Image: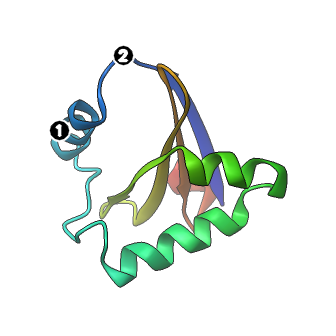
C-alpha cells in the first residue's frame, strides 16, 4: 500500500530533516546505505512512469518510521511544495 502526502512549506531541506528527526520519521541508516537505496528503488518503481523523472530530479531524501515500519520518499516538485510518498504492506498502517 502507498500514500502520497502533499504539503506547502517554506521550510528548508535542513529544517525538514530536523522536523522529521523530532517526529521519529528519520532513519538511523545513512542516506547512502544499501538498504535505503533499495527502498528508494522500490518506491520509485511504484510511481507512474510519466511522473518518475520529475520525482527523481526533485528528490530530497528517504524517511523511515520504525513504529509503523514504513519507508517514504520525499521530493520537492516545485518551490514550497513537498511530496511524501510512503509505502507500507498494510493499508491500515497508512491511516
Residue 60, image x, y percentages: 41, 47
Query: What is the residue that sits farthest to the bottom in this orientation?
Result: 34
Describe residue 17's horizontal placement relative to residue 90 as left or right: left
Residue hosting label 1: 18
Mark found first going from the N terminus, 1 or 2: 2
Residue sitting at x 29%, y 50%: 25
Q: In the rendered view, tell whether residue 78 sits above or below residue 73.
A: above
Secondary structure found at label 1: helix
Q: Nearer the viewer, residue 50 or 94?
A: 50
| Name of the residue lying farthest toward the right | 50
Count of numbered badges drawn on the protein: 2
- Residue found at x 57% / y 49%: 57
**Residue 35 location, quadrant:** bottom left
Q: Quadrant of the C terminus?
A: top right
Dot 2, how many residues are within 10 Å of its Cα: few (below 14), some (14-19), or many (20+)?
few
Give SS at disc 2: loop
Q: Residue furthest front?
A: 57
In percent of width and height, residue 86 lies at 53, 53
Q: Which of the image's four quarters has the N terminus?
A: bottom right
Disc number lying in front (1 or 2): 2
Looking at the image, is 37 positioned above or below residue 58? below
Label 1: few (<14), some (14–19) or many (≥20) C-alpha neighbours in 10 Å: some
Left or right of 39? Residue 19 is left
Quarter of the view holding residue 52: bottom right
Is the residue 87 above or below the residue 32 in the image?
A: above
Is residue 33 depicted above or below 7 in this figure? below
Instruction: Find residue 51 and report its horizontal and vertical position in percent.
Output: 75, 48
- Residue shown at the point (44%, 75%) measured from the top left: 37
Q: Do the CB atoms of the residues marked 1 and 2 lie less than 8 Å apart?
A: no
Specify whether 5 is left or right of 74.
Answer: right
The residues tagged by marks 1 and 2 sit, at their Cα atoms, a distance apart of 14 Å
Q: Which residue is mark 2?
A: 10
Amino acid at each position: 500500500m502507498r500514500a502520497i502526502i502533499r504539503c506547502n512549506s517554506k521550510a528548508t531541506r535542513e529544517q525538514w530533516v530536523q522536523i522529521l528527526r523530532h517526529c521519529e520519521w528519520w532513519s538511523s541508516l545513512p542516506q547512502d546505505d544499501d538498504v535505503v537505496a533499495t527502498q528508494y528503488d522500490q518506491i520509485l518503481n511504484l510511481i507512474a512512469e510519466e511522473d518518475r523523472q520529475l520525482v527523481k530530479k526533485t528528490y530530497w531524501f528517504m524517511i523511515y518510521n520504525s513504529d509503523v515500519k514504513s519507508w517514504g520518499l520525499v521530493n520537492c516538485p516545485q518551490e514550497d511544495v513537498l511530496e511524501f510518498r510512503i509505502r507500507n504492506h498494510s493499508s491500515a498502517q497508512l491511516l
